């Protein structure tokens, strides 16, 4: 629990914002955020951990009290435990006493054992970038009322990371993702926002599908990185072949694709996703004749969500359920 006065906390936020306005390089901002959290809460460990878009493994990009060797060798998959749930749902992890919650504490622990800890999602434009971790040697250092302050630091982290991403993107100014031939996520997100506004005005529905390639990392390990890229492009080609002129599809993550279907209620979106799932399962991809399956989460506006943010979250949660219910299936709210 922070013992700083409110004006001191405000001073810390002002410092971070001042650096954030002055640079598009996130390293200085992230290091300052970590330092200020440590000073506020007397943390044993504090770290910014992001999803590496090249590998979809977690990696540490800023930290306090982690050894160089630990950071260098830290290569954690998203997995299926507490961290995976937090990254998928956005619900923070708050551990008041690790001795009372040993299973979650083991899943959350970095280099050093702790008594209390907190982990919060870092998200930008509805995409999960990683999470903020803080822990302490004593119990009950973090309480529910601290989550708002810590989430604000996580949000500043997301702004710094996304600002850097947008800067790199603007250097390229290419609306098409080169590895899939689909639309990049930023213009897709603009299209989704426009489509929701139009659907609301016309009292129509639209559906959103998020597709994850099952066992994509293992396929890369078996056939090689170039073959996995050809597989990704092949699956994107199947998706494009099923789009109507008013629909859209985009690269969403390392091995995830997202599809917008206009004028499509939930049952229509589910039927489309099932058709797509079967087509992909029955197709051989690339010169290696790779066979794979996909998991798909489907949600619809306004049936499942009343806003762009809630629609994306509903589709992500449906995908999480499909992935952890056996894969090669379609799930919906």
Image: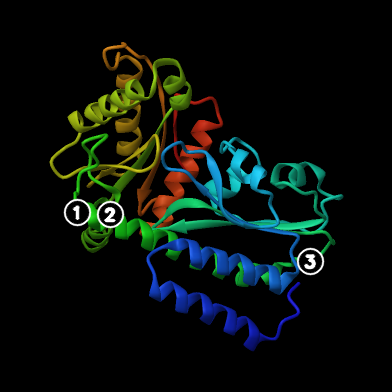
- The disc placed on residue 242 is none
Depicted 135 relative to depicted 55: above or below: below
Q: Secondary structure at mark 1?
A: loop
Q: Position of residue 302 (x, y in %)?
A: 35, 54
Determine which of the numbered discs, if any, sits on residue 141 in the image.
Answer: 3
Answer whether labels 2 and 1 touch (C-beta < 8 Å).
Answer: yes
**Residue 108 x %, y %:** 70, 47
- Mark 3 or 1, which is nearer the eye? 1
Which residue sits at x=73%, y=75%?
Answer: 2
* Residue at position x 19%, y 54% in the image: 173
Residue at image mark 2: 169
Vertical position of residue 107 compared to residue 279: above or below: below
User: What residue is shown with label 1?
Assistant: 173
Dot 2 alpha-carbon crowd within 10 angstroms: few under 14, some 14 to 19, many 20 or more: some
N-term mark: 3 or 1:
3
Task: Report the residue at 29% width, 26% height from top.
Answer: 235
The colour style of the image is rainbow
Dot 2 falls on a residue whose secondary structure is: helix
């Amino acid at each position: 629990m922070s013992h700083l006065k409110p004006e001191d906390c405000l001073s810390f936020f002002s410092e971070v914002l001042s650096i954030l306005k002055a640079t598009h390089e996130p390293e200085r901002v992230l290091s300052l955020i970590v330092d200020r959290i440590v000073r506020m809460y007397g943390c044993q460990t504090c770290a910014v951990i992001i999803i590496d878009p090249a590998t979809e493994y977690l990696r540490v990009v800023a930290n306090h009290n982690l050894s160089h060797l630990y950071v260098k060798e830290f290569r954690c998959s998203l997995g299926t435990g507490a961290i995976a749930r937090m990254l998928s749902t956005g619900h923070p992890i708050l551990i008041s006493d690790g001795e009372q919650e040993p299973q979650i504490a083991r899943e959350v622990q970095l280099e050093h054992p702790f008594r209390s800890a907190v982990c919060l999602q870092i998200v930008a434009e509805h995409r999960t970038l990683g999470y903020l971790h803080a822990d302490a040697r004593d119990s009950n250092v973090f309480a529910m009322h601290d989550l708002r302050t810590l989430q604000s630091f996580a949000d500043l982290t997301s702004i710094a990371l996304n600002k850097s991403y947008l800067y790199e993107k603007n250097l390229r100014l290419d609306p098409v993702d080169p590895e899939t031939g689909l639309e990049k996520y930023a213009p897709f997100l603009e299209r989704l926002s426009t489509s929701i506004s139009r659907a609301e005005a016309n009292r129509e529905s639209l559906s959103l599908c998020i597709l994850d390639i099952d066992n994509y990392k293992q396929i890369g390990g078996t056939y090689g990185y170039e073959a996995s890229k050809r597989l990704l492009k092949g699956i994107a080609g199947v998706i494009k072949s099923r789009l109507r002129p008013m629909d859209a599809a985009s690269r969403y993550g390392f091995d995830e694709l997202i599809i917008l279907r206009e004028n499509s209620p939930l049952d229509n979106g589910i039927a489309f996703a099932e058709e797509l799932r079967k087509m992909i399962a029955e197709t051989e991809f690339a010169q290696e004749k790779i066979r794979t399956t996909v998991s798909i989460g489907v949600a619809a506006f306004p049936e499942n969500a009343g806003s762009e943010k809630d629609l994306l979250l509903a589709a992500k949660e449906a995908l999480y359920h499909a992935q952890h219910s056996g894969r090669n299936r379609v799930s919906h709210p």
